[in-house]
Image: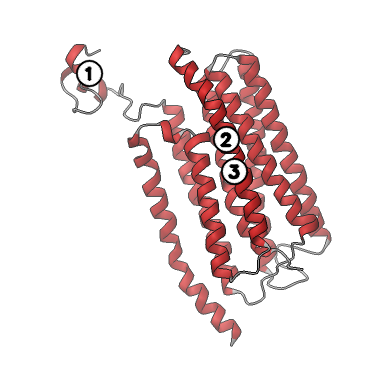
């Protein structure tokens, strides 16, 4: 279990983990600064969600080690999850309709 | 067990003979990970969909509302939530260091890093509970608040409460793993699987923080 290849992998990974952690903190700081800019709400939402997806990908790839697993595992887990989450977006046109109704 | 040609052909070229019989008997590991790790990954996918459903339900009522409250001042709320985010991200770093220690066979290192991770989780909970009490003090209830749409409380406490429950369960889970590791009960796979759970809880916060806090900050 603890052969030399695994040991070398663990040594190299320490610096990678610290690097990824630094990026996660930096991107969080960017999000906080961004939240106080006077941007149009759709642009703000898009920028914040893009940054969050980047952060989530960093966590999944490096901290959760998925980058180093077999491709078949990634294909088992990710497409179905992303598909199901995207399907939930069908509710939003109704949300916009209710908003317009509330304004009237 | 298959030998020679058959063993080499297992991963990609399809299964034949003894290798096929082994696979049929449940001996194969097509994803090249243990079943505990696969089980945790499948749980994480289902939990990710649960949290997504809650975040989308929250976004739905918020978008439909013309008077959604945006009560979070920089001091204390946004600053507090930012510190909580930094704590949770840092606890993920101590967690991977714990997993790394377990891969290197360093048991006391695992216990030390897991305790540091648990401390981060407890600190996160304490800061979060302090904020909850502050909001309750200002008159926020599940279906009532002084500012606007009454669903604000239900969606805020529901989302952050489910997340806080995950953090709390995570602290207990890591405590069990740390205790068992110190007694030699658990393998490096058990530590790694608990790490997957912890990172996932961290990941969920990366969506709650911008959607619930940053999008509801009170501009000066």
In this rendering, is residue B111 above or below B117?
A: above
Foreground: disc 3 or disc 1:
3
Q: In terms of image quadrants, where is residue B76? A: bottom right
Label 3 CA crowd tier, 10 Å (few <14, some 14–19, many 20+): many
Q: Nearer the viewer, mark 2 or mark 1?
A: 2
Residue B159 showing in the rendered view: no
SS assignment at label 2: helix
Q: Where is mark 1, residue-wise? A: B8
Q: Percent position (x, y) of residue A64?
A: 50, 35
Q: How many numbered discs sit on the rendered protein?
A: 3
Circle 2 residue: A19
Q: CA distance from mark 3 to mark 2?
A: 9 Å
Residue A24: numbered disc: 3
Look at the numbered disc 3 and give the secondary structure of its residue. Answer: helix
CA–CA distance in space, label 2 to label 1: 37 Å
Label 3 vs label 2, nearer the camera: 2
Q: Residue at x 54, y 69 (%)?
A: A42
Query: Disc 1 sits on a residue from what chain?
Result: B
* The furthest residue to the bottom: A104
Give me the C-alpha separation between circle 3 and circle 1: 41 Å
Local packing at callout 1 (Cα closer than 10 Å; few below 14, some 14-19, many 20+) is: few
Residue placed furthest toward the left: B17
């Amino acid at each position: 279990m603890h052969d030399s290849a695994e040991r070398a992998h663990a040594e190299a990974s320490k610096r990678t983990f610290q690097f990824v952690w630094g990026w996660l903190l930096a991107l969080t700081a960017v999000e906080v600064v961004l939240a106080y800019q006077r941007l149009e709400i759709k642009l703000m939402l898009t920028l914040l969600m893009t940054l969050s997806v980047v952060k989530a990908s960093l966590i999944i790839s490096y901290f959760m080690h998925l980058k180093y697993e077999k491709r078949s595992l990634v294909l088992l887990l990710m497409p179905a999850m992303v598909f199901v989450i995207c399907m939930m977006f069908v509710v939003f046109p109704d949300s916009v309709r209710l908003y317009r109704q509330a304004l009237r | 067990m298959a030998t020679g040609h058959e063993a080499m052909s297992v991963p990609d070229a399809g299964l034949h003979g003894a290798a096929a019989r082994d696979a049929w008997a449940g001996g194969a590991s097509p994803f090249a990970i243990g079943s505990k790790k696969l089980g945790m990954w499948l749980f994480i996918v289902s939990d990710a969909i649960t949290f997504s459903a809650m975040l989308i339900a929250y976004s739905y009522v918020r978008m439909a509302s013309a008077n959604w409250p945006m009560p979070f001042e920089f001091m204390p709320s946004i600053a507090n939530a930012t510190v909580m985010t930094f704590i949770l991200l840092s606890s993920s770093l101590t967690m991977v260091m714990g997993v790394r220690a377990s891969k290197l066979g360093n048991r006391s290192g695992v216990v030390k890093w897991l305790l540091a991770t648990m401390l981060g989780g407890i600190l996160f909970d304490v800061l979060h509970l302090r904020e909850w009490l502050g909001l309750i003090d200002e008159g926020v209830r599940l279906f009532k608040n002084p500012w606007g749409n009454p669903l604000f409380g239900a969606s805020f406490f529901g989302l952050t409460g489910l997340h806080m429950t995950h953090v709390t369960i995570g602290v207990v889970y890591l405590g069990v793993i740390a205790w068992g590791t110190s007694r030699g009960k658990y393998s490096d796979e058990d530590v790694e699987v608990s790490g997957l759970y912890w990172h996932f809880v961290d990941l969920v916060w990366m969506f709650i923080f911008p959607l619930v806090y940053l999008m509801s900050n009170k501009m000066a």
